[in-house]
Amino acid sequence: MNSQVKQKYALVTGGNRGIGFAICQGLLASGFDVILAARSLDKAKAAAGKLPSTNSKVHVVELDVADDQSIDRAVQHVSQEIPHLDVLINNAGIYPDEGVDILTVSRELLDRAMNTNVFGPIRISQAFLPLLEKALQARIINVSSGYGELSGLSFQVPSYCLSKLTLNGATIMLADALKAKEIAVNAICPGWVRTDMGGASAPRSPEQGADTAIWLATEASPSLSGKLWRDRKEVSY
């Protein structure tokens, strides 16, 4: 086995800030080459410039998870740079529920949340599957939320809750569909994290929010699949 085959590669959507950026940092420290994906190539490059220098490489790619053409272009670009993909982390997401609840939320806002937070990860998993199939025991990790658990649903956060609930369902379905290919699929709840989405008063750091995703990518048994995790422990959907 040559050095190229031994090298591991991970792609992180929304990797330019918050939890995604912390995941990139952790995977680099674990020896992965990281593909940092962001909606803007300039933002991806700026974030890559802030990552610490290691023996591993950082690649950047423009990827809008709500745009199929952008996803297809990203796959084509990434396929030219790496031979396989060991880890796909579907981190990019939106929280568009300011000032609405389940009684006032519009169809347009529900569409936006579902398109980004659910249909994006499904489509990206489909599109990058050929690269994942070339890896040994590849892993897909979906960044979900406690708001997506049945016990955590809030009528005051309608589109976000429903999208993360559906993402959890998609995680179960993808895990079942990819079991024969030995590709593990899991979801994580990072907790309430100090990010642009979570706000400055959140109790957890981005590094704390990223920890379980990094653990699933690097240390957890590849036999674990179809589960929801928080702080490295399985929790109920």
Image (tube, rainbow, N blue to C red):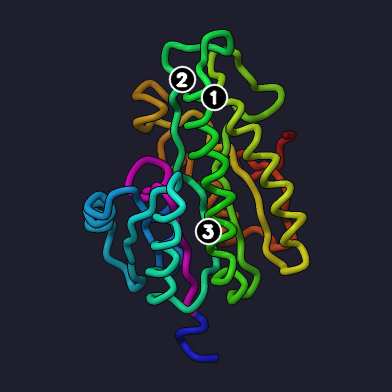
Amino acid residing under circle 1:
Ser
Amino acid residing under circle 3:
Leu
The question of residue 113 being in magenta is answered with no
Mark 1 and mark 3: Cα distance apart in space:
24 Å
Q: Give the crowd class for mark 3: few <14, some 14-19, many >=20 residues within 10 Å.
A: many
> What's the residue at 47%, 40% (across, down)?
208
Mark 3 and mark 2: Cα distance apart in space:
27 Å
Side of 95 where 212 appears, left or right? right
**116 or 216, nearer to the observer:** 116
Q: Which residue is mark 1?
A: 159
Amino acid residing under circle 2:
Asp
- Above-or-below relation of 236 to 211: above
Secondary element at tag 3: strand
Quadrant of the image for the C terminus?
A: top right
Q: Which residues are magenta?
A: 7-21
Q: Which residue is mark 3?
A: 88
In the picture, residue 222 is in which quadrant?
bottom right
